[in-house]
Image: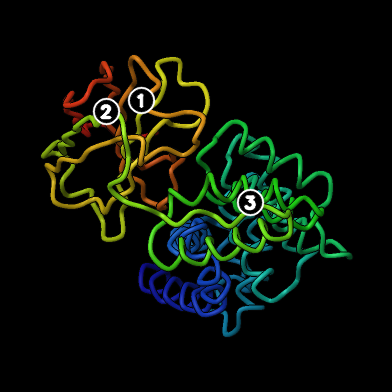
């Protein structure tokens, strides 16, 4: 049985990777990523071959196509309908085949089982839009996106899709505002592509172009933050992990007043936060008497915390030029 499990896992994951890679490449930097698909696939393969139901001849035969793999997964879900990972994996496979309505329905099952998962809520909202006959975000999708962005102001995919919905609804000024909140959380080609979309939205809204970035021109105090990593977590870092360092108001309300996004490498590292790192012109670091500093290593590259991320306990600091603090990343988000 062990050899069979290994061969089935390899075949199923290979087919899913081939089918789903184009979908997730298009959303790289704003998505859960293909790694999540493969991880979920591993769980489902184990469930498929590790239980008495796997003795069913239909499940014992190795799938030769993605359709056969999907059919096996559907049979397994008929026996275990409470598997969130299973419904998500099924939905992504179906949507990779442009079976939008079936993918939507599978994600509806997953969302019903885990209604408080913001990543899943955004993915379900996307599926609702793709399955809609007019290609627009239906009311349920809009509600989901607004709830995610309200409860998780730095959720990258939530901000991106809600901005897309506002643009689709003829509200380009709101779309631009949402995407401008997202822009500081992105880097490289992803940020450049988003700046182009913001420029188009601002033009449609009759707004002036987005000002060019001017590094090093910030006024006001700059605080220095050193981020350390507990040696016991050193082997938990993975290539592609992202470090976020935030300064928030002490009550934690609203967006961070400053944020830095860096590769999670080279610990300990030292950085500065100033008004140049703010997300909103009306809420600056220099306007705060005290702030809470936080640091988090994100697995997905998203600013919102997720299980498996590594983080430091918050430290309160008086805002003054030259003020210093140390954050030690020592716990895992559950």
Q: Are marks 2 and 1 in contact (CB under 8 Å)?
A: yes
Residue occupied by mark 2 = 221
Q: Earlier in the sequence, mark 3 or mark 2?
A: 3
Residue 176 badge: 3
Q: Earlier in the sequence, mark 2 or mark 1?
A: 2
Picture coordinates of residue 225, whole percent (x, y)? 20, 33
Q: Say which of marks 1 and 3 sits in front.
A: 1
Mark 2 neighbour class, 10 Å CA radius: few under 14, some 14 to 19, many 20 or more: some
Mark 3 neighbour class, 10 Å CA radius: few under 14, some 14 to 19, many 20 or more: many
Q: Quadrant of the N terminus?
A: bottom left
Q: Is residue 113 visible?
A: yes
Q: Quadrant of residue 151?
A: top right
Q: Quadrant of residue 95?
A: bottom right
Q: In whole angstroms, how far apart are the C-alphas of marks 2 and 1?
A: 6 Å
Q: Say which of marks 3 and 2 sits in front.
A: 2
Q: Quadrant of residue 38?
A: bottom left
In the image, residue 159 sits, relative to residue 38, either above or below, namely above
In the image, residue 299 sits, relative to residue 44, either above or below, namely above
In the image, residue 310 sits, relative to residue 211, either above or below, namely above
The residue positioned 69% from the left and 38% from the top of the image is 146
Mark 1 neighbour class, 10 Å CA radius: few under 14, some 14 to 19, many 20 or more: some
Q: Secondary structure beneath disc 3?
A: helix
Residue occupied by mark 1 = 286
């Amino acid at each position: 049985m062990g050899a069979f499990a290994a061969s089935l896992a390899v075949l199923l994951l290979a087919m899913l990777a081939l089918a789903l890679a184009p979908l997730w490449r298009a959303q790289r930097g704003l998505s859960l990523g293909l790694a999540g698909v493969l991880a979920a696939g591993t769980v489902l393969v184990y469930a498929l071959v590790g239980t008495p139901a796997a003795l069913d001849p239909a499940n014992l035969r190795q799938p030769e196509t993605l359709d056969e793999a999907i059919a096996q997964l559907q049979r397994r879900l008929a026996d275990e309908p409470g598997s969130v990972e299973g419904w998500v994996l099924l939905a992504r496979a179906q949507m990779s085949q442009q079976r939008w309505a079936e993918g939507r329905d599978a994600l509806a099952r997953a969302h019903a089982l885990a209604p408080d998962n913001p990543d899943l809520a955004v993915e379900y909202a996307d599926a609702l839009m793709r399955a809609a006959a007019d290609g627009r975000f239906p009311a349920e999708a809009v509600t989901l996106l607004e709830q995610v962005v309200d409860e998780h102001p730095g959720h990258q995919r939530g901000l991106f899709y809600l901005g897309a919905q506002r643009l689709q609804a003829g509200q380009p000024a709101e779309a631009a505002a949402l995407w401008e909140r997202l822009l500081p959380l992105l880097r490289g080609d992803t940020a450049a592509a988003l700046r182009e979309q913001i420029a188009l939205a601002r033009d449609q809204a009759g707004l002036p172009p987005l000002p060019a970035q001017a590094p090093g021109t910030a006024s006001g105090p700059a605080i220095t933050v050193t981020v350390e990593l507990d040696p016991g977590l050193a082997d938990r870092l993975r290539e592609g992990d992202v470090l976020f360092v935030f300064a928030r108001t002490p009550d934690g309300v609203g967006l961070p007043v400053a944020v830095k996004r860096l590769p999670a490498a080279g610990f300990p590292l030292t950085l500065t936060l100033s008004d140049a790192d703010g997300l909103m012109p009306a809420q600056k670091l220099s306007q705060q008497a005290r702030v809470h500093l936080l640091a988090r290593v994100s697995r997905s590259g998203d600013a919102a915390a997720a299980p498996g991320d590594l983080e430091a306990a918050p430290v309160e600091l008086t805002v003054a030029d030259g003020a210093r603090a140390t954050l030690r990343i020592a716990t895992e988000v559950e």
